[in-house]
């Protein structure tokens, strides 16, 4: 095993051992990475969540007065609760040329390889800086990276490109759909089920909204984008959680459901949301409030993630194509932080080791060959950054 590969693997083992499930603090991992980088003389910056329990880490190798290339990744992982793991998910193990553990593919692998490469990058007196951007709470809606990008945009020279290392099997992904998440809360009027005319059934009203969502979905499906790189080639509606009622013989007072959209670039998620709001305001709320002013429906916008709009001529695509020799780029339907960077003026691609099929699964793994491919890529990037400024 090459030296850099074995260093990357031990770093991955170290990172997997920090349980950074999104609901927990990630400070131990961030402190570890920051100390490791600062001991080498690599300057870092941290930005925190409101209560100071989670942090993003930014590091710059090379000149600090230039834009450069960002390697961006999240260090939080999805929960292992209820999953059937054959070993301890936070103690990496190896079998058949694969490294198993929570986060190996999504996406501590990429972060570990970058960290393992840092001494080499530091030694080379880079002309173009390479930055690390490690963020928290990606898995719960790309939350952490927003503070990191704000800090970057306000205080640092604007980078020329970002590589988001989500697992793409080391293929270039140039676009991702955006998303919009909404919580709908329906308050009815309770009563005995035998007297439905004396109450307002919140589940029934919820069903009418969901019915509209289905109609919208059908319209979107029937009008796909031609030549779209996305699968499916249209905006989709998702409905993930619903709660309502307390007993079969009580008119349910409260119903709540969480729904959202995965927005195809070019579509207007806000307009879809407004159509649902109009239906509630013009039809449902007047009906409910005619029965009782206490009844009614509210809808809260919980989360918005911008799309990464494909741009095959961008500096990010050009660089990764040049370094890898790849000449094609695809698109994915899941959200990443790349759209936030794009909004801030930094073009990006999604490009990283491992496969999304293993992400979020029990016995998640990354293949050794994928780690090696990423090591090779980062070596080429380092050579490039040492020679070009
Ligand atoms: Zn991820």
Image (tube, rainbow, N blue to C red):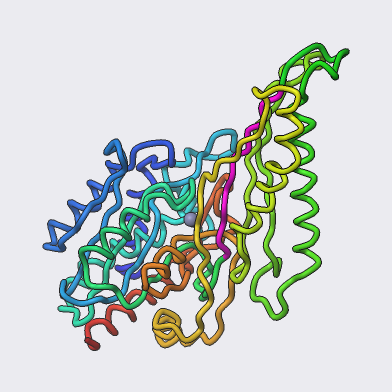
Is 232 or 225 nearer to us in this picture? Answer: 225
Q: Residue at x 72, y 43 (%)?
A: 282
Q: Is residue 247 left or right of residue 129?
A: right
Please identify the quadrant where the N terminus is shown: bottom left
Query: Which of the two residues, 323 or 161, is positioned nearer the viewer here?
Result: 161
User: Tag count in the figure?
Assistant: 0
The main secondary structure of the magenta stretch is strand
Question: Is 182 colored magenta in this rendering?
Answer: yes
The percent position of residue 278, horizontal first and vertical second, equals 68, 48
Residue depicted at 74% across the width and 27% down the height: 290
User: In the image, is residue 301 above or below residue 63?
Assistant: above
* Corner quadrant of residue 121: bottom left
Kindly identify the residue that appears in the image at 17 percent across and 51 percent down: 35
Relative placement, left or right, of 325 versus 268 is left
Which of the 4 image quadrants contains residue 219?
bottom right
Q: Residue at x 20, y 56 (%)?
A: 45
Q: Is residue 302 visible?
A: yes
Q: Is residue 111 within the magenta segment?
A: no
Q: Provide residue 344's location: percent of width, then percent of height.
A: 37, 68
> The C terminus appears in which quarter of the rendering?
bottom left
Closer-to-camera residue (5/260): 260
Residue ranking furthest to the right: 194
Q: Position of residue 87 (x, y in %)?
A: 51, 39
Classify residue 65 as left or right of residue 353. left
Residue 387: x percent and y percent?
23, 88
What residue span does the magenta drawing correspond to? 177-188
Front position in the image: 374 or 4: 374
């Amino acid at each position: 095993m090459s030296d850099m590969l074995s260093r990357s693997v031990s770093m991955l083992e170290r990172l997997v051992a920090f349980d950074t499930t999104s609901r927990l603090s990630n400070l131990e991992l961030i402190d570890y990475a920051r100390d490791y980088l600062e001991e080498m003389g690599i300057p870092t910056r941290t930005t925190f969540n409101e209560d100071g329990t989670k942090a993003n880490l930014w590091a710059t190798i090379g000149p600090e007065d230039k834009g450069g290339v960002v390697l961006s990744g999240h260090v939080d992982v999805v929960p292992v609760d209820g999953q059937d793991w054959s070993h301890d998910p936070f103690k990496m193990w190896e079998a058949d040329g694969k490294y198993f553990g929570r986060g190996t593919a999504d996406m501590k692998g990429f972060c570990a390889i970058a960290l393992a490469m840092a001494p080499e990058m530091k030694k080379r007196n880079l002309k173009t800086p390479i930055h690390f951007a490690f963020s928290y709470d990606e898995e719960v809606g790309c939350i952490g990276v927003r503070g990191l990008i704000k800090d970057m945009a306000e205080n640092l020279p604007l980078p020329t490109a970002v590589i988001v290392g989500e697992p793409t099997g080391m293929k270039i992904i140039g676009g991702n759909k955006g998303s919009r998440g909404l919580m709908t809360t329906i308050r009815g009027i309770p009563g005995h089920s035998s007297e439905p005319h004396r109450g307002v059934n919140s589940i029934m009203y919820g069903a009418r909204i969901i019915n509209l969502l289905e109609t919208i979905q059908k319209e979107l499906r029937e009008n796909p984008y031609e030549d779209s790189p996305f699968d499916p080639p249209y905006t989709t509606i998702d409905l993930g959680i619903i709660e309502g009622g307390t007993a079969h013989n009580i008119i349910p007072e409260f119903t709540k459901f969480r729904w959202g959209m995965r927005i195809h670039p070019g579509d207007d998620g806000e307009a879809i949301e407004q159509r649902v709001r109009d239906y509630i305001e013009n039809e449902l709320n007047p009906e409910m409030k005619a029965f009782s002013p206490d009844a009614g429906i509210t809808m809260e916008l919980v989360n918005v993630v911008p799309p990464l709009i494909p741009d095959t001529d961008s500096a990010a695509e050009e660089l990764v194509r040049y370094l890898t020799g790849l000449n094609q780029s695809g698109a994915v339907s899941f959200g990443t932080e790349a759209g936030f960077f794009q909004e801030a003026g930094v073009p990006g691609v999604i490009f990283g080791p491992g496969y999304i099929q293993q992400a979020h699964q029990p016995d998640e793994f990354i293949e050794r060959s994928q780690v090696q491919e990423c090591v090779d890529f980062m070596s080429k990037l380092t050579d490039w950054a040492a020679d070009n400024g």
